[in-house]
Image (cartoon, rainbow, N blue to C red):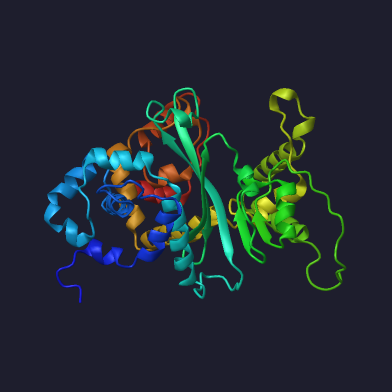
């Protein structure tokens, strides 16, 4: 069916040519056009996008190398760098914006019944923006900073199919929240946004649509609970904070029994510093954190007790511990210890007065026996008690 056709021409056959002609006629795109039509311009830019061309000269060179196949790919006009530059500068951009909206509408209908991992029948959108840096000398109209230009691309992405449903280009200085004024809410849809879009007046407009929104709260947001639904407190969990507090207390008690009270006191000092931040001297003060947030971060957050640290400990670290126990059971650790002692076993470690602190592990491996001899024959020596097992081991050496 497609024998002899290029891949590019096969892709372009999916485009609705009638819809494109309607967009061109709406804005008189081909008015006083001689040879290079709007469709030729669209094919050039589509080819540049698909083949990752970097400049107009790059587009011209690549198309000239394929000149014999341009007619079969759909090109009817002569492609040159100056002609393409004039078309990009003078043609009405709304032609391609309207055509893109038509293509987006057709593409979204293909993914209406796609399952994107959530058991939701409503349309779910993700709204975000990206700042694109530009050269100030080439784009003086897009001044962003003193020495840099830029634009901001706002995109509303339909998560079914990951298709952009709304695209808008603004100045880079424009704050993200202002784009909500240009957004037409879809009744029943769910909008997922970052904390940069947190504006209660604009979010209330979404609520009246009626639409739903999921947004991150700012750290300085002042929230007050207006009412609570009646709950039978005799059944189930009364409060998440109670469970979080119990988890923290149990972990601290385990720490105290296994390591000691020192680490537990350090934890209490850290929690006190987090809660009493506003009341501390100015040099170490901060805005402070509530007990609820501290408990949520420790017991529920991804950086707390059950976060990434525990995940690494239960996978990678546990594997190393198992491997170390395996080596110890079969004498592998003793080989490494003998290798280290054969290299530096006769040398005494620690400061100059380290011989005053003798530990049995050093004698078990015959470490620093010369230092032990010097200490015994010194005038400071009074009494030395040596266990039989250690003495026998030393005799064998």
Foreground pick, 345 / 176: 176
Residue depicted at 41% across the width and 33% down the height: 134
- Residue 379 picture location, percent across and down: 48, 23
Residue depicted at 36% across the width and 54% down the height: 333
Residue depicted at 45% across the width and 67% down the height: 106
In the displayed structure, would residue 325 be above or below residue 280? below
Q: How many marks?
A: 0
- Residue 365 picture location, percent across and down: 37, 46
Foreground pick, 135 / 366: 135
In the displayed structure, would residue 325 be above or below residue 169? below
Q: Is residue 2 left or right of residue 220?
A: left
Residue furthest front in the image: 32
- Residue 150 picture location, percent across and down: 46, 34
Residue depicted at 76% across the width and 57% down the height: 241
Residue 357 in view of the camera? yes
Examine the image and state in which quarter residue 192 appears. Answer: bottom right
Which of the image's four quarters has the N terminus?
A: bottom left
In the displayed structure, would residue 52 be above or below residue 173? below
Foreground pick, 83 / 281: 83
- Residue 308 picture location, percent across and down: 53, 54
Foreground pick, 23 / 228: 23
Residue 16 in view of the camera? no
Q: Is residue 273 left or right of residue 376?
A: right
């Amino acid at each position: 069916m497609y024998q002899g056709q290029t891949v590019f021409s096969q892709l372009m056959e999916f485009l609705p040519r009638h819809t494109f002609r309607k967009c061109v006629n709406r804005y008189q795109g081909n008015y006083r056009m001689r040879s290079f039509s709007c469709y030729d311009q669209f094919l050039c830019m589509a080819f540049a996008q698909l083949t990752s061309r970097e400049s107009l000269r790059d587009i011209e060179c690549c198309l000239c190398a394929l000149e014999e196949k341009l007619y079969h790919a759909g090109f009817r006009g002569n492609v040159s760098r100056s002609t393409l530059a004039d078309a990009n500068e003078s043609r009405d951009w709304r032609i391609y914006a309207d055509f893109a909206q038509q293509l987006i509408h057709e593409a979204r209908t293909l993914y209406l019944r796609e399952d994107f991992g959530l058991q939701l029948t409503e349309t779910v959108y993700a709204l975000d923006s990206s700042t694109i840096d530009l050269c100030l000398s080439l784009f003086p109209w897009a001044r962003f900073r003193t020495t840099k230009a830029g634009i901001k691309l706002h995109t509303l992405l339909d998560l079914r199919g990951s298709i952009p449903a709304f695209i808008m280009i603004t100045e880079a200085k424009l704050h993200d929240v202002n784009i909500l004024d240009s957004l037409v809410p879809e009744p029943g849809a769910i909008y997922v946004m970052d904390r940069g879009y947190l504006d209660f007046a604009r979010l209330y407009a979404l609520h009246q649509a009626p639409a739903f929104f999921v947004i991150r709260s700012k750290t300085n947001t002042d929230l007050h609970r207006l009412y609570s639904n009646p709950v039978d407190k005799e059944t189930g969990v009364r409060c998440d904070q109670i469970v979080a507090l119990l988890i923290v207390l149990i972990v601290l008690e385990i720490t105290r029994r296994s390591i000691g009270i020192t680490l537990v006191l350090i934890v209490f000092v850290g929690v006190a510093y987090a809660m009493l931040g506003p009341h501390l001297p100015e040099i170490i003060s901060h805005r402070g954190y509530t007990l609820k947030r501290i408990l949520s971060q420790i017991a529920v957050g991804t950086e707390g007790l059950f976060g990434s640290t525990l995940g690494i400990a239960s996978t990678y670290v546990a594997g190393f511990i198992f491997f170390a126990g395996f080596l110890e059971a079969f004498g592998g650790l003793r080989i490494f210890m003998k290798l280290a002692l054969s290299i530096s076993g006769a040398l005494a470690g620690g400061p100059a007065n380290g011989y005053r602190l003798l530990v049995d592990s050093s004698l078990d491996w015959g470490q620093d026996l010369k230092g032990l001899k010097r200490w015994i024959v010194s005038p400071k020596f009074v009494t030395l008690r040596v266990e039989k097992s250690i003495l026998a081991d030393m005799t064998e050496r």
